[in-house]
Image (cartoon, rainbow, N blue to C red):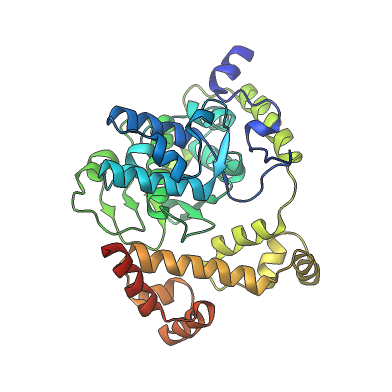
Amino acid sequence: MSSELLAGDTWSFSPIERSRALNKDGRLTSIGSVHVCAVRTIYEILIEKNIDSADLFRQAGIEPQTLSTLEAISFASLGRLTALAASQAQCAHFGLLVGQRTTLASLGLLGSLLRHSETVGDALGALETHYDLLNRGALIEVTREAAVATVRYSPYDPDADGISLHCERAVAALTNVLRSLCGPDWRPDEALLPRLEPPNTGPYRSFFRCPVRFEQEYAALVFPAQCLRQPIAGARPVIRSVVERRIRQLEAVVPSDLIGEVRRQVRSTVVKKRVEKSQIAQSLAICRRTLSRRLRAEGTTFRSVANQTRLGMAKQLLYDTNLSLAEISAALEFSEPAAFTRAFRRWTGTTPSEWRNRRTIEIIH
């Protein structure tokens, strides 16, 4: 059993810094860190394309010589690196290239947990619960409505550099995960991507093997809910139990991050229904007054964290899609487009239309 666990544990998690990087003070990084496996994949792709990556890595704030020992980087740095690499390679689907190289083995302990879950639904539930091991800049959510299931990828900071590439990388990675669990012929009913449609959609159709919907409100795969009940061939419950226990040991020593958890809950809730402090407090198992007091002690408020999260979502949809203001307003649960415009002006000092036009001009120049 130990040899099989080690085979799946390609990161050799030894103490917790293997799942979350340590900063210069020796403290664990909190929200916004992501495992370095995607960075190494980007490096490999650039080498294959005969592109000198050293300068790109430095522009993203990553020293190339640290790749052999680096275990995690900031979510923002990965986004900058992906955007720079896509531009240098002149490849609009660069995020797809990175994501389609994901394997269960590259997910380390979490990959072993998924591989030995009883059903596909159990595996996706484990991914949803323990995704922080891989990525503290986004969350995975699995939902089911009647005969349709959706697995969604939601970044906490939707207006970060390269966010659309982050999203397509993650959706491609999720597709590979599901093919590893269900068989190589598995395909979703739809792939949803919150980005402008590229000139050449062939690589997307070829990889996903299903309709690909661009300019969507969020990144997701849609597939038949019956897939969740499918048993995973060769799963061994004993291995799952051992791996899950190890994962919970790692998670138990991670410092709490209340602001990050509020952002996580707001991000999850905002596309489903109106965000209320009481709902978020309940999901965090604390009362509203305690939530307010603890946020105040960290120098912020619930309204501020919620508004920052919604602003990030608004900027991403304005920048990466051609959705109308009415569509974006509805996606963010505003009562009407005028209310969205007033809130956006209050947050930024300008209107959504003015902000979108200015960003378009910046791209052109």
Q: Is residue 353 visible?
A: yes
96 w.r.t. 318: above or below:
above
Q: 118 left or right of 22?
A: left
Looking at the rendered image, the quarter that the C terminus falls into is bottom left
Q: Position of residue 346 (x, y in %)?
A: 53, 82
Q: Choose between 19 and 187: the one closer to the eye.
A: 19
Looking at the rendered image, the quarter that the N terminus falls into is top right
Q: Position of residue 255 (x, y in %)?
A: 75, 46
Q: Position of residue 75 (x, y in %)?
A: 52, 48
Residue beneath the point at 46% across and 36% down:
39
Q: Is residue 147 visible?
A: no
Which quarter of the picture shows residue 203?
Answer: top left
Which quarter of the picture shows residue 317?
Answer: bottom left
142 w.r.t. 279: above or below:
above
**Count of numbered circles on the image:** 0
Q: Position of residue 329 (x, y in %)?
A: 42, 77
Residue beneath the point at 79% across and 66% down:
297
